[in-house]
Structures are given as structure tokens and as C-alpha cells.
Amino acid sequence: MDSGSKTPPQPITNGGSVEHGETQHDLSQVLQALEAIYDPHSSNETRKHASAYLENARRLPEAPAHGFNLALNKAQPPPLRHYGLSMLEYSIKYGWEDYTIEQGEALRHYVIQLAQNISEEDPVYLRNKVAQLWTEIAKRTWGAEWRDMDEQLVQLWGTSLHHQAVVLYILETLSEEIFNREDVTAGLRGNDLGRACVEIFLSAAVLKWHLPTRDKGPNYRCGEEGWLKRLCDLLDWCLSNDYEKDERIRTCAIKILNTLRAAMTWVIPKAITATDCIEHVCKALAVPVVSLQQASVEVLHAIYSRPHLQDDEFVDLVCPMFTPGSVSLLREVYRWTLADMNIHDLNEQKYTLCKKLSELSSNLGNFIEQKPQLIPEGSDLPGMFNLLFDMLRNPSLVVSIPILHSWTKLLRSRIVRDSDTVTQLIGGLLETCCSRLIRYEALPEDTDDPTMLFLNEDVDTVPERHAFLGNYRRYCVDVVEVIVRRTPVEAIHHILGQAENLFQTLYTDQPPFQAHNFAKYSTPVLRVDAQITVIDAALKGYLKWLSTHGSDPQKDEHDRSTMQDSFERWCSKVLHTKFEDPEIAKKIIQLMVAFSTKALPDRAGFALSLLEYILGAALPDNPNLPQYSDAVKDLERTCSVEVQKLAMAFPDQFMAVYNDLERKINNVLSTQTTDDRQRMAFSAFLLIIVHRSTTLDRATQEARMREMLITVKEAWQNEDFTKSLASFQSFCDMLAMGRLPDFFSAHNFQGVQDWSSQPLDNEGQVMQASILERSQQLPLRLTKTLLAASTEKLRDGSQEFETACVLWAEAIPTILPNLLQLVSHAQAFNNLDNWSHLPEELQQVVKRVLTDRFWQAGISTESRDDFFARVSGSKSTYEGFASTVRGTVRQIRETCYFILYALTRFRDFFYGIPDLPVPLSQALFGNAHALSAHHLSVLLSVSTQLIEGCPANLRAHFLPPMISGLFGELDRKITLEWDAINRQISESGDNENLSDEMKTESILRQLTYSAVSLVSALLDYQQHPDSPRNAQSRGEQSLWKFIIETPQVLEHILMFCKNTIRVRDTRCVALVVRVLRSTLVRFQEKSPIRDFYCIDILQAAITSLHEPYFVDVQKDLAGLIAAIIHLDEDIPRSIIMSLPGMPDKAYRVDRKLAVLRGANQSERMQRSIVLDLLSSVRGVSIHEQGKIERAKPKKKTAMQEQYMSVDEQPTIVRGTSPGLSGVADMFS
């Protein structure tokens, strides 16, 4: 056939015109250009010209014919032949729509002829490229003009092993791109391609059984057997031949398995069963070749990752894996992988196989939990359970965690749990989970613990390691909890016995505790922490058992009483044990209070004994040992918090001895060097007893509480305090900071580089102490403490809550005026405009003083403990003074936030105050732009509470100034900060220290995501009806509806959303796009909001769509663009037509838009149309842009990613994005 007679024209893409006079002599120039590019001695200029020449050559009208001739000519060097294939690829991808059917057919014949003419001598990359071109044409024409493709594949299949490899590549790629990936081209013809794929993969018999009424459409298949059968037959042939020594056969077998894996996600289970596919794959798994075993496990994993199997499918697909032979095979392969599992000499291939086998076994375990009753007699479930138990104990936590996750599910199944085998394994499961609750991340870096060494091998970053270990601990706790819930008496006896033994032998192998050797994560602390975590889990399991017991009331009540006696005896023993390590003492006290309030709620005698123990638990302080001293103070704070929990649980019992308690507390306060925080905490303890006691009559109760709260009101009404808030300067004077600029200048802060090494003189230390003392005189901490005591753990509507409302309603009007002034000044302190009168060098000093030191997991170069030790050790330096200044102001600001949040509990008493919203908005947001991203996150958090807590009947009064003020500042701040980050990244050099830059970016990502999450909460009308936010407003107008119907509120939110589409954080963009899509359906009628969607939001979405950074959210962006196009006939079209290169393609644009707006288009089809429509901007397909820029994927499976998932961490991307002129500025 004379294929060359049908040379296609030049593809009409990318705009550029080319001289067409070049003919045959161009081939030599192409070769020279390729040689210039690959020659290491070529200059950059030479390479640039060579690349431009090759790029232009691909656009020649005769490029397909040139490319075909180059690729077919085996005399040409492989790089030149590969370039010929790329010429064909360019024509197929960018010119296909402009070809006639005949021209398309000519291109197809080129590719078929190339596939027929490949030989074993051709490099693999050439053969794969030919197969890729085949799939590109198939995606465009198979099932339409190209109906005999299957026949041509079968002909190739019978030619040779390397022809079979081409067919395998084609079948695998089609499976992946039609069913498993969001391929744009395949998506445009998804239904036709899917139907054709099903037809050629399944046998005629299975197809007839599955679709007996299938339409008698065109026949695409060749033969009766189908490709699944052919693949299994060829796999059998490979395994029957010399696969160990013949690499060609071994490679063919692996490719077959890869193709099967791609198909297993979508072929019907009946087809898998009919071809004995599982049996063939298990045969491959049994051969001692790791690469074949890995590929086999991948196929099985694809089969057993399928959700929602029907009962008959479960029996046919899953149950064969529980036969004695299959279980034995899995065990043998697992044992084989263990033979080389020495962390110091690791066989990487076998270790990877072990991890994959674990994931497969986990899926099989989950199937047992789902439908144990369907598993037939004769199955080796005991063997399977023992295998899962052995895998759980693997020294690698990455191997262990999928199995651990499965056990959390298996133990919830009564059939599984009550089986003899699992009953025998319970002790071992409990022991394993208890031993692995140690905080591995706190072990020293030079540890030789194999588990930690494996973890370092598997998990690259600190945040991922923390997330992974957090998940592992959570599953261990879950197993302990479930075991205790099912067998409470035996399990708790075992766990408490372990703990008692630990506490008695804590220092057996090492010297006793000495304060000068204190370490926050010493070995005894870690052992106690792990044991207490086990006991906490057991306590949860006991409480769940308690909430459901009653099937045998007499026995259950006896067991409950027995266990409570056991708890009390055990706790009393612990209280007689002296713990001198403050970190351990703190954990023990927290545990004892948990027992008292949760497990022993009617044992008031023990609660009183525990209270006495806590009040006497103080340890001697030693200020010369900073870390130990901080731990002692932390213990004291913990004690004051824990006694409040006891007071909430036993108010009547404590009321009976109230006078004695008051004397005891006064005695404690007089004998200890207690700070104001403790003093106030004990006041709150007494308030809780009075407030929650049911033995006092209400009048007496209110009178005593009112007396306690008088000090709060008087403090806020103090005339001198009010005067000190009259101006920013008087605020600074009040805090002894009025002379700060003079102090900085006199002590030459501007001339000192390293503030942490410059000691403070006596004057500085006096001033530092004065600042702290003045701040403690403010009524903030007292108000915060008593507010928390008045509201914590109280249900709205309860008598105690109503009492609190009445009493605080009297105080709120007194508190608010000065509180708003205080928060306003505390935020203004960070506004450099308030320091602009100072000389430039002192302004820089103030800016530095206001810059926080902070530690970030996975980014900071020092450990968390080293960071805190460094901060603690610099208290008496210039840096310590600066920390006191900014810390004092921050503390004031955040305590004000807490008080405002606490006042929202009183609902109408707070929200209904006339004229509150505007002053509150001004106080909170007037200087918010001056706060750092971290501090703004705290303000955002309290603002969220203020907004969401507003009663429905007061929204119109309260919310407009609050939401407008908040989102105005968020939009301003986040946009400016991202611009600064992007500018900093583009300007920074490759060798710069990026730690500070990454920390800043990480905090900004967190702020942005919190803001977007608030948008989602405010505008999400699909919330679960039982969510707390909806529970408040049942029968009332929904919050989202109020916002949508209030334009002055909605416009600020939408402006923020529009700008967020452009921030370089894919998680935030994905969420904001989802919210915008769910909201736009409300604006079908012509309105300014609809126009904003059709112009501003559409432009932002298109701009992000064409930046390589956003490759992972292209699906989401394309879906939003498609939804906007449906909104309006004209505006989106005019926006698209304004893009570079689009005016010449009006017919194509209109045709695509018409198809997009057509009825019954799936979301995937709509996305594909949008991506295809916009792919020609600058002539580079969107997905290609992504592939150029996308980082190499980590070698983690989806399951491993699940267990290591963390909030998206900052990635510093250098300024390497291609210049998208005409795209980035296309709307300017």
C-alpha cells in the first residue's frame, strides 16, 4: 500500500508558520541537530538553535511522512528513528482534529506498518514508542473508524515475542487510560472505548452470559477467547519454559502480569474466574524470582482491592485464597522474604515484596471480617490468622501496619473473635500492641533498635514519620480497646499487673532519678508513657463495655463491681508510690484522675484521697536546672487543672468538706512559691464546687458565686485601668514599655548582630521583670480562668449553665469596652505604622523584636528539645528581652481572644448586645494585617467560633461586619504573603539556607487552608443534618442560605475564593474549587455574582489550569470551568476566545462548547472537553506541562501513603516554570 500518497497537511496548532521548501536534505540536518543536542561539547546556543530547528521540523506539512520514513529505515541511527516517531506523535496529538478521515487513516497505516516491522534488534524504547503511537490513535478512532484493531493485534500476537511485547504495552496502556486514569483524550470517547475494551478482553461466552441483551452493534473482537485467556495462556507458556535463564521470557511474563494488573480493576469477576486467572497468577507467585513475584502480588492486590463484591463473586474470587494450598503459598513466600531481612544488609527487592505481600494479606484479612459466613468448610482460616499474627510482629512497622489495621477490624467480628485460633492469639496480640506503644520518635538518633532503623529506611521526612507512628499507635490502642471490651476482666487484670510490675522495677537497670539528670524523654519516662497509653486504651474499652453490658445483668454487675474494686486497689497502691521525676508524676496524676472521674464515679472516698495526694504532690524546684524547673512548674499547673476535673465530677462530696478544702488550699498557697496562675486555678476549683453542687439552694449558690466574681467586675471597671487604655502610648506605658525605643537605643540593640549572645545588664533585667509583673496585674487571666470554670462541660439549658448565664450577663457589659480596647492595642503593637516616627535603625529593631522564633517539625534543623533549651537558656539576653516583649503582647492578645470565645457560650446575652458587631470587628480586624501568618491563624480560629456560634435570629445583626472584616483582611494578607513567598523563591539562589523560608511557607499554607476550610463550612449546604452547626439551627434559616442572600457578606468571601485559586497550594485550591462549584448552582439568573463567576473566577481558573504547578488539581479546575460555561452562553465564550491562538479557532471552540453543553454529559466527559479545548494554549498540552514539571513519584504504595499522610508540607520550587507569556498575562 502506498501510504505516502496520503501525506497529511501541516497541523493547524501553535500558530507558528514555517518555510516549506525543505525536502529530502532535511534528514541530514535533523541528524546533525540531534547530534548537537546530545554532544556534551555543544554550547548552549548551539543546543538552543538545534532544538528550535527540530521543533519547527515537526510542524512541516510533510512531517508525518518524514517521520514515518525515518522511523521505518533501520539503517538510520536509533535517536534519529526515535525523532521520526516523535514527528508522528506531534501530528497525532496536535493535528488530528484538522485531518480528514483519509488523512487520519494514512497516519494509522503508518503506525500499523511500523508495529509490523519492529524487530528484536530495535531498542526497547523504539518499540515502546511505536506501541504508544498505536494507543494514541486507538484513543481517537478505535470503535469508530477503526474497527479491525483487535484483528491486527491478534496478527501481531502470533508473530514473535517482541511483537507480543508491543501488544502487551498497547493493552496495558489502553486499560490504564480508559479505566484507571483521567486521560483527556480517552475521556472524550470514554463510553465507546470502554465498550470496545470489554468486548475484546472478555471471552465470547462470558460476554454473552454477562450481557445477554447486549445490542447487536458493530463487532470489534477477533476470535472467541478474548485477551484475558490469551494472556493467561502465554503466562503459562512462559512459566513452563526457561524463565530463570532467558531474560526475554522472564520480561514477557512480567509484562503479562502488568497487563493483567491494569485489567483487574475493571473486568467483571466472572471473566477472572472463567480464565482461572488467580490460579495462573499464584503459579507465578510460587516461582523463586522476586521480580515475577512482585508483579504477581500486584495483580492479586488489584483483584482484592475491588470494593463491593457480591456474595457469589466473594465465593469465586476471594475464597480460593483461603484454601490450604493458597495460605501455604503466602506463608512460604513471606518466610522467603524474611530470610534476607537484616536491616544492616537488606535485600531491597525482597523487602519490597514483603511490604506488598503484607498489603495483599491485609486486604484478604478485611474480606474475612466482611463475610466470614461465606468462607467454606475446609478453608485454612487458622493458618491465615497465624500468618497475619506473624506479619503483625514483623520488625518493620511498614510491613506490620496494614496487618495491624486489619486486626482492628477482625477483632470486631464475633465469628472471628470467638474462633479457637484467634482466642489463642489474643494474649500475643495484646503483648505486641502494648510493646509497640513506645514513642519511637523520642528514641535517641543513634539507637540500634531494629524497628527504628527500618522506620528510618522507609520514611524520609520527620512529619511523615510522626504521622505514621501516630497512626500505628492509634491502631495499637484500638486493638487493646477492643480486646478489653470483649474480655474485660482478664485483659484488665493482665494490663494492670504489667503496670504494677513496671512501676516497681522502673529503675532496676539504671541509677535512681536525680534532678540534674532529668530528661523529658528518658527511658523510664518513655516506658511509663507507653504503659499509661495501654491503660488509657483499656479504660476506654472498659467504659464501652460498661455502656453496653446487660446481656447477663447479674454476671455483668458482678464483673463491674469486681473490676471497680480492682481499679481502686490498684490506684491506691500507685498513690503510695513516690515518683520523683516530674514528667512521670504528671502522667500518673492525669491517669489517676481519669480512673476516678470515669471508672470510679461513685467512689467519693477515693476521689478525696486522690485530691489530698494531688495537693501534696509538689516537688522541690531548682531554678539552676532550667529543664527540670520547667517540668516542676508544668507538674504544678497539671495538678491545678486535674483538681478542677475532680471538682466537676464530685461537687457534692467536695462541698461537704468545703471549709477543710479551703483551709488546705490556703495552706498549700502559703507554703509553695505559687504564681498567680496557680492561685487563680485554685480559685476556679472552689468556684466549680460551689457552682455545681446540688446541695446548696440556688439563692445561696448565686450569692456565693456573685461574691467570687465581684473581683472580676471591679478589675475591669478600675478607673486607672480604663485611662491606661485611652491611647496606644498609654497602653505601652501601662505595660512598662513606654520607654522601649529609648532603651533599645541606649543599649545599642541596632548594633548587635547576635542578640542571644549579648547579656542583659541590670537595668534591662529590671525592665524585663517590670513588664512581666505589669502584664500579670491585668484582669485577663482571672477572667479567663473563672469563665472556663463556669462553662466547661456544662450542657446548654442545664441549671448550672443558666446560673452562669445570669451571673456573667451582669459582668459582660462591664468587661467588653476595655476588652475591645485591649485587643485593639495588642494588635496595633505589631503594626509598624505605630513605630514609623522612630529612626530607621530603631524601626528595624522593633521589626526584629516582633519576629517570633519558632520550631517546625521536618523543617527546623535542630530538635524540638534543643530549640526549647536554647530559648530557655537565652532568657537573660537581648533575645530573651525581645521574647518577653512580644510574648507579653501575644499573651494579652490571645487571652482576649479566649475571653471573647468563652462569652459566645452565653449566646443572646453576648450576641444580642446593641452596637457590638462594628466595634468588635474593628477591634479584631483593624490591625489584623500587621499580624504574622501564625498569629492571624489564632485570630481566624476565634473568629470562626464567633461566626459559627451566632444564633440564627441574630445573624443579620452580628455577622455582616464580622465576616466582611475577616475575609477582607484574610484576602489582603494571604494574597500579599503568597506574592512575597513566590517572589522570594524566584529570587533566591540554589545554595541558600531555606529553613526560614520553608517555615514561613508552611505557616502560610496552614493559615490558607484554615481560611478555605471556614469558607467550606460557611457555604456548604450539604452538611450532615446531625452536625452540631445544623443542630443549633433546626427549623431556622441555614447559615449558607443567609450568606448567599446577603451580598455584602458573600462578595468578600467570593473575592477571597477567586484569589485563592491562584495560591500555590493544591490542597487549598482543590477545596475552594469544590466550594465554588457547589455554590454556583445558586446563581442561574443574571446577576453581578453570576458575572463575577463568568469573568473573574473563570479567568483565575484558566490561569491556574495552565501553570505546571497545578497539575494535580487540573481535574478540579476543569470541572469548575465546565460548570461556569454552563452558567452563561456568551461571557465564558468571549473569555476563551480572548486566549492566545483562540481567535483563529472559533469553529473548533463553538463545536466543543456545544458538545459540552449537550445533555447527559458525564463529569469526566465535561472535564475532558475543557482540557482538550484549552490544551492548545502555547501549543503544549496541559498534561505534558505537568509531566515536565512533576517531581518523580516517591516509591510508596497507595496504602503506605495513607498511613504516612500529613498536611501538605511546603515544597520549595525554584523559578524553573516555563515562561507562560500569553497565559499568565492573558487577561491583563
Image (tube, rainbow, N blue to C red):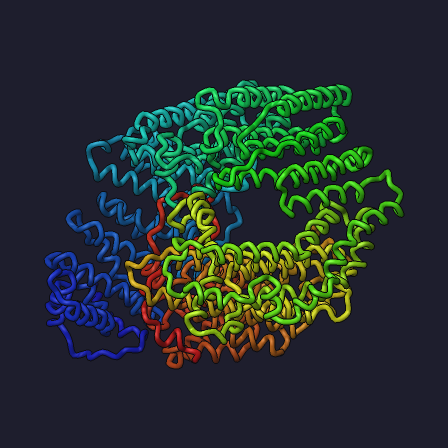
Q: Where is residue 427 in the image (x, y as percent from the top left)?
A: 54, 20
Q: Quadrant of the N terminus?
A: bottom left
Figure check: 842 above or below 611: below
Q: In this view, does 896 lie to the left or right of 381?
A: right
Figure check: 1166 above or below 343: below
Determine the residue located farthest toward the front in the rendered image: 762
Which of the two residues, 1188 or 1048, is positioned nearer the viewer here? 1048
Q: Which residue is drawn at 48% across and 51% down?
A: 1207
Q: Position of residue 542 (x, y in %)?
A: 66, 28
Q: Residue at x 55, y 41 (%)?
A: 308
Q: Is residue 433 left or right of residue 756?
A: right
Which of the two residues, 875 or 52, is positioned nearer the viewer here? 875
Q: Where is residue 596 in the image (x, y as percent from the top left)?
A: 69, 31
Which of the two residues, 829 or 193, is positioned nearer the viewer here? 829
Q: Where is residue 66 in the image (x, y as percent from the top left)?
A: 18, 67
Q: Residue at x 38, y 55 (%)?
A: 995
Which of the two residues, 1228 or 1182, is positioned nearer the viewer here? 1228
Say if residue 178 shows up in the picture: no
Q: In which quarter of the image is the C terminus?
A: bottom left
Task: Count the labels in the image.
Answer: 0
Figure check: 250 above or below 859: above
Q: In this view, does 1046 lie to the left or right of 770?
A: right
Res 82 → quadrant: bottom left
Say if residue 1224 shows up in the picture: yes
